[in-house]
Image (spheres, grey):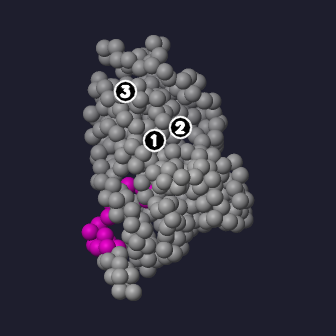
Amino acid sequence: MVVGAGPAGSAAALRARQLRPEARVLLLDREDFPRDKACGDGIAAHGRDELARLGLPGLIDDHRPTRRLEVVSPGGERVHATVARPNHVVPRRVFDARLVEAARARGVEVRRHRVRALAERGPHVLVDGVFAARAVVAADGANSTVRRLLGLPATPERHTAIAVRGYAEVPAGDDVQLIAMQREGWPAYAWSFPVGDGSANVGFGMLLPRLQACDLPGRRVLHGRLAELLPHLPARDLRAHRLPLSCGRPRPGAGRVMLAGDAASLINPLTGEGIYYALLSGRLAGEAAVRAAGDPLPAYRRALRGALGRHLRTTDVLARAARSPGFIDAAIAVASRRREVFDLLVEVGLGAGTVPPRLAGAVAGRWLLDGLRLRGR
């Protein structure tokens, strides 16, 4: 059984049926699809790799790839380059519905249902006294009901970001993904991700404690800073959402229940990217549910550790270093001159990359030099 039909949940259901076509898989969600979801809508090449593993290599081929990325650091350093592999921007109303339909076409039973109770009954998990399953994948989002029912803590506020997302009109030929960082209230940044149809997903995000420290209405701060950083892109359909960052991730489940995607706090703390993590963790949970149905959680934990362990330790460390805007200034300055550093930033921010000591040293050296220059003024 899978609770939550977003990318993580759909990936889990798809993978279970892919590995065992005769398996009975129930996919529950509290909403009907298609439905909107506040998100940056970015699907990196790493996410497309996961779609291919799920047997859906052409799911988003009708959406134009975006090949260029521009990043402006808090101090004004700038890098503008073509990514090694293009990204896509697909509104979640479209992307999630396609995944659900693919799961249904593969034989997954999809039902609208809001989960309220969870109990273990011998070798099964009983949901709401109605549904029984040998393994459950909880992919019900940042405010996961299943995680709460398991007694697992929510992500601490210090490891939670909040963002507002909308859409704006852009030239039809715009294919540059823009990330514009802001020193005030750092870490904080705005983005513009062109969809390819004359619109762009635009938004602004910052850490929740920094927003609370502003002592102003959250809507006023988020909407105001988005307008300040992207004045040429007036936004419509603005919606706010919380992002539980991976540096505050809980245990990935309990008993026969596995947490995946946002429910497991799998959001990159450097970029806010979560769709790749969702597809990956959902796939691994679906594999564990089929291959280790008697005790799926240990198998899932091992698989997560193997796929993301080193990467998550890397982002944990970098997230602490990134509390200094000077560190980000140094990283972007080096990336603007060295292609391998730019490619590495993309891999760490959008995929499962790690940082080789040699390149970490180059950024640290620039950071130290910049600091000495400032003190010498």
Name the mark nearer the viewer: 3 or 2: 3
Instruction: Tell whether 33 sits left or right of 212.
Output: right
Q: Is residue 37 visible?
A: yes
Q: Provide the residue designation for mark 3.
A: 150
Bin the neighbour count of mark 2 within 10 Å (Cα to Cα): few under 14, some 14-19, many 20 and up.
many
Amino acid found under the numbered disc labelled 3: Leu
Residue 352: x and y, percent? 38, 55
Residue pictured at 42% horizontal, 52% vertical: 268
Which mark identifies residue 183? none
Name the mark nearer the viewer: 1 or 2: 1
Residues drawn in magenta: 349-364
Residue pictured at 34% horizontal, 39% vertical: 250
Q: Is residue 338 magenta?
A: no
Of label 3 and label 2, which has the lower sequence position? 2
Mark 3 to mark 1 CA distance (whole Å): 16 Å
Residue pictured at 53% horizontal, 33% vertical: 5
Instruction: Tell whether 136 sits left or right of 228.
Output: left
Amino acid found under the numbered disc labelled 2: Gly
Q: Provide the residue designation for mark 2.
A: 6
Residue 240: x and y, percent? 59, 46
Residue pictured at 35% horizontal, 75% vertical: 367
